[in-house]
Amino acid sequence: MEARSPVRYANATLPDGSRRHIDVEGGRIVGLPIADDDKPAKHEVVDLSGMLVLPALVDGHIHLDKTLLGLPWVPNQARGGQVADRIEAERHVRAARTLPESETGANLVRQIIANGTLHMRSHVDIDNQLGLKNLHEVLKIRERFRNLVTIQIVAFPQSGIARSPGTAELLEEAIAQGADLVGGLDPVGIDGDLEGHLAVIFSIAERRGGGVDLHLHDTGDSGIAQLLAIAERTKAAGLQGQVAVSHAFALGSVPTDRAARAADRLADAGVAIMSHGPGAAPMPPLKLLREHGVTVFGGSDNIRDAWSPFGNGDMLERAMLIAYRANFRHDEDLALAFDMVTTAAAGVLGIPCYGLALGASADFVTVNATSLPEAVASRPMRRLVVKAGRVIARDGVLLP
Ligand SMILES: [Zn+2]
């Protein structure tokens, strides 16, 4: 199918339940007539026969350089359950790799696209042992798939900043070489230096004009204090709307009134919160955060790597896992989980022309489900993945 010739995807069921044709021209949605309009189409027609159409899925947090997808099974080697134990275990796994990160990462990207995700934010490890090697590997992946998928890169200090001398300079160089945002990692839990860690990150973001996305696993009073400090720094740097905190387990580890007060400060500073529906760690109170005006969005986090044996990059399944972990049962709650892996994540990533609307990029997914909540609950196979009006994957397989 030619990308630029007009196409009608006929008889689509949209998430609002309406039955419409989706007219595509020049890679964009140019018409959404109701489906009983049977004026003869002047275009090529693909009949969807009532299939549910969803906007392209968005993965707000992934690690393309960490995955071992395509290698023989690698058992998890962490000797303890702390973040520091896993950082150490990853060094051993990395040293034993027989495929470069650009190949294993590409395996994951192909799987992700076939599952309907067309935009993602990948954190990429940077420390004084790795230097910018993993960045260069992920930049290769970004170039290779640039016509199919958006890959936003976070320069991520996986070994800390104070703990890994030279990393601050490497983070800045990473931005100069193509990373889009500066990352961070447990300023207190890993570096033991809240203000020092944040000063490095925010000064790079301010000078280079990019956003910030920090991993924060620290819980309790310490975690809340770090969230409030991030909110303060965000406002002082004028970076409202460009800062996210990934995990933020602390918000799920304190009494509700305390979490609510922190939520007000995060909302005021325009700091978004990413959750992947953690298995064992405290879950941020998603509905409370939303009620207080905080943007919450979703991501896969680790997939088949030294940190986790699980994951597959399927964001419909991720919406289900988030909903399951949050004890969501009602349709409006399942819709919230879905929003976290579509519209909310696209907003955080700043994806232009997103959604199923006139003038938007014709990027969408079709599934056999009668409604959006059913799609989240049953996470059916993606029948078609459409990018700029062109079918790029069918029945879970990326087309050549
Ligand atoms: Zn992560």
Image: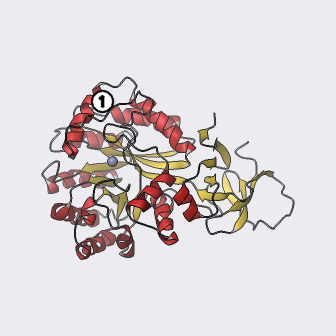
Residue 239 spot, x, y in % from top left = 33, 62
Secondary structure category for the residue under label 1: helix
Q: Is residue 295 left or right of 21 when viewed as pictured?
A: left
Q: Mark 1 near ligand 1 (CB under 8 Å)?
A: no
Q: Quadrant of residue 284?
A: bottom left
Q: Residue at x 38, y 60 (%)?
A: 325
Confirm whether residue 7 shows in the render: yes
Position above or below: 126 against 322: above
For this rendering, which residue is in front, 168 or 80?
80
Q: Residue furthest left?
A: 192
Q: Is residue 385 visible?
A: no
Q: Amino acid at mark 1?
A: Arg
Q: Position of residue 215 (x, y in %)?
A: 28, 52
> Which of these two is toward me, 347 or 170?
347
State which quarter of the image contains the N terminus.
Answer: top right
Residue drawn where x is 54% and y is 54% of the image: 379
Q: Identify the residue at horizontal 52%, vertical 70% (top origin).
A: 331
Q: Which residue is mark 1?
A: 94
Name the quadrant containing residue 323: bottom left
Q: Residue at x 16, y 56 (%)?
A: 194
Image coords of residue 224 (percent x, y)? 21, 65
Q: Residues within 10 Å of mark 1 (few under 14, many from 20)?
A: some
Q: Is residue 304 found left or right of 129 in the rendered image?
A: right
